[in-house]
Amino acid sequence: MGGRGAPPPPGGPPRRSVSPAGLAAGHLVLREAGSGTRDVLEDALGQAGVRLPSHVTALGSTAAVKSAVRHGDGVTVLSALTVADDVAAGHLVTVPIAQLDLSRRLRVVWRDGASLSAPARRLAAVAGAR
């Protein structure tokens, strides 16, 4: 996962970083409770001693979250991949979150007894090496 996404500031350079407490104090726009991204954020904030506030806007899709942040004054935490095009186009900026581990554990899965193709075996090998 990347840093937080926010609309570009209306003049001046973007912030260099934000603290976990500073992030939680902002107008957060997140995925719904139970989404993987939100779970990772809540766990990371908890490890930093920060609770997610009750005033969070929760939306049901990543596209809705990005649109709300892009057209409002909120901030979000999404994977770097999901905001890459918006960042490249200048619609959103990323800001690192200081001292917050937002990595998540992914698993490669397949049907029991299935014979994997050569590319799938290579992917599984790379994923298992991390």
Image (cartoon, rainbow, N blue to C red):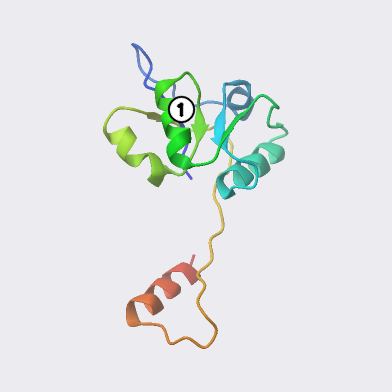
For label 1, the crowd category at 10 Å Cα-Cα, with few meaning under 14, some 14 to 19 and many 20 or more, is some
8 and 64: which is toward the camera: 64
9 and 71: which is toward the camera: 71
35 and 61: which is toward the camera: 61
Most distant residue in the top direction: 11
The total number of labels drawn is 1
Q: Position of residue 107 (x, y in %)?
A: 54, 66
Q: Please give the name of the residue rendered at 49% of the width and 42% of the height, measured from the top-left corner.
A: 61
63 and 19: which is toward the camera: 63
Residue 117 vertical position relative to residue 58 in the rendered view, above or below: below
Q: Is residue 32 visible?
A: yes
Most distant residue in the left direction: 89
Q: Please give the name of the residue rendered at 40% of the width and 26% of the height, measured from the top-left corner.
A: 70
Label 1 element class: helix
Q: Please give the name of the residue rendered at 45% of the width and 26% of the height, measured from the top-left corner.
A: 69
Q: Position of residue 5 (x, y in %)?
A: 44, 31
Q: Would you identify the image quadrant in which residue 12 lies?
A: top left
Q: Is residue 126 left or right of residue 31?
A: left
Residue 47 vertical position relative to residue 122 in the rendered view, above or below: above
Q: Position of residue 86 (x, y in %)?
A: 33, 34
Q: Please give the name of the residue rendered at 51% of the width and 32% of the height, measured from the top-left corner.
A: 76
Q: Which residue is mark 1?
A: 68
Q: Is residue 8 left or right of residue 21?
A: left
Q: Would you identify the image quadrant in which residue 32 lies?
A: top right
Q: Position of residue 14 (x, y in %)?
A: 39, 20
Question: What's the residue type where badge 1 is placed?
Answer: Ala
Residue 37 vertical position relative to residue 18 in the rendered view, above or below: below
